[in-house]
Image (spheres, rainbow, N blue to C red):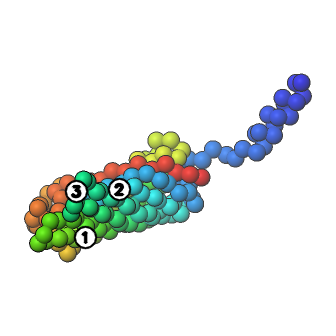
């Protein structure tokens, strides 16, 4: 019996790989992220390629009644300038789109955002990452204006330009 347990333990140890830290190459993360603009974000998926990671998000809101379906989607790319076993710092940016359903005569408002900046990912476990993003938000189409560092430089807050230029996310990575 003792030999069988020892043999089973050796097989388990031989089959197991080395413990991996966060930011593993070729891993996919599922979670949620929000844009710097404060308007876009949703369920997201990231792919970590080692030296960089990229991903996208999708959000949908449809309340009771007519003319109230809002859709948002976008993508992000960050190149890792520095990485440790449990964190990375990347430069890059994102793009976000939000379509807000309105009653007539406006019908829909289309908001687009270009968001260059940086992102810090902190792996609180080997496969769970918290992300913190900061940068510049440039409003396009119906979203006029620019904001940086939490201070509005120009634009109309009623058109979706946010004065808060920080965003957060969480992802669970599958190795």
- Mark 2 or 3: the one toward you: 3
**Dot 3: few (<14), some (14–19), or many (≥20) neighbours within 10 Å?**
few
Question: Is there CB contact under 8 Å for labels 2 and 3?
Answer: no
Image side of residue 67 versus residue 14, left or right: left
Q: Secondary structure at mark 2?
A: strand
Q: Secondary structure at mark 1?
A: strand
**Count of numbered labels shown in the rendering:** 3
Q: Which residue is mark 1?
A: 112
The residue at 41%/48% (across/down) is 170
Q: CA distance from mark 2 to mark 3?
A: 22 Å
Q: CA distance from mark 1 to mark 2?
A: 15 Å
User: How far from the left and from the top, in percent, is residue 7?
Assistant: 86, 34
Residue 12 visible = yes
Question: Is there CB contact under 8 Å for labels 1 and 2?
Answer: no
Looking at the rendering, which quadrant does residue 160 occupy?
Answer: bottom left
Looking at the rendering, which quadrant does residue 109 occupy?
Answer: bottom left
- Mark 1 or 3: the one toward you: 3
Above or below, 152 relative to 139: above
Q: Which residue is mark 3?
A: 65
Q: Secondary structure at mark 3?
A: loop
Residue 38 visible = no
Image side of residue 28 versus residue 134, left or right: right
User: How far from the left and from the top, in percent, is residue 132?
Assistant: 34, 51
Q: Which residue is mark 2?
A: 42
The residue at 20%/54% (across/down) is 164
Image side of residue 19 versus residue 22, left or right: right
């Amino acid at each position: 019996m003792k030999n069988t347990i020892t043999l089973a333990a050796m097989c388990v140890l031989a089959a197991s790989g080395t413990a991996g830290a966060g930011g593993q190459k070729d891993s996919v993360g599922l979670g949620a992220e929000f844009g710097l603009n404060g308007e876009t974000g949703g369920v997201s998926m990231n792919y970590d390629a080692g030296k960089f990671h990229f991903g996208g998000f999708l959000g949908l809101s449809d309340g009771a009644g007519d003319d109230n379906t809002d859709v948002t989607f976008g993508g992000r790319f960050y190149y890792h300038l520095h990485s440790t076993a449990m964190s990375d710092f990347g430069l890059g940016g994102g793009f976000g789109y939000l379509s807000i359903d309105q009653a007539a005569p406006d019908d829909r408002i289309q908001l687009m955002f270009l968001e260059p900046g940086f992102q810090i990912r902190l792996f609180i476990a080997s496969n769970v990452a918290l992300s913190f993003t900061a940068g510049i938000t440039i409003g396009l189409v119906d979203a006029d204006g620019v904001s940086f560092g939490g201070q509005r430089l120009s634009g109309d807050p009623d058109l979706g330009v946010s004065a808060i230029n920080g965003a957060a996310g969480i992802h669970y990575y599958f190795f």
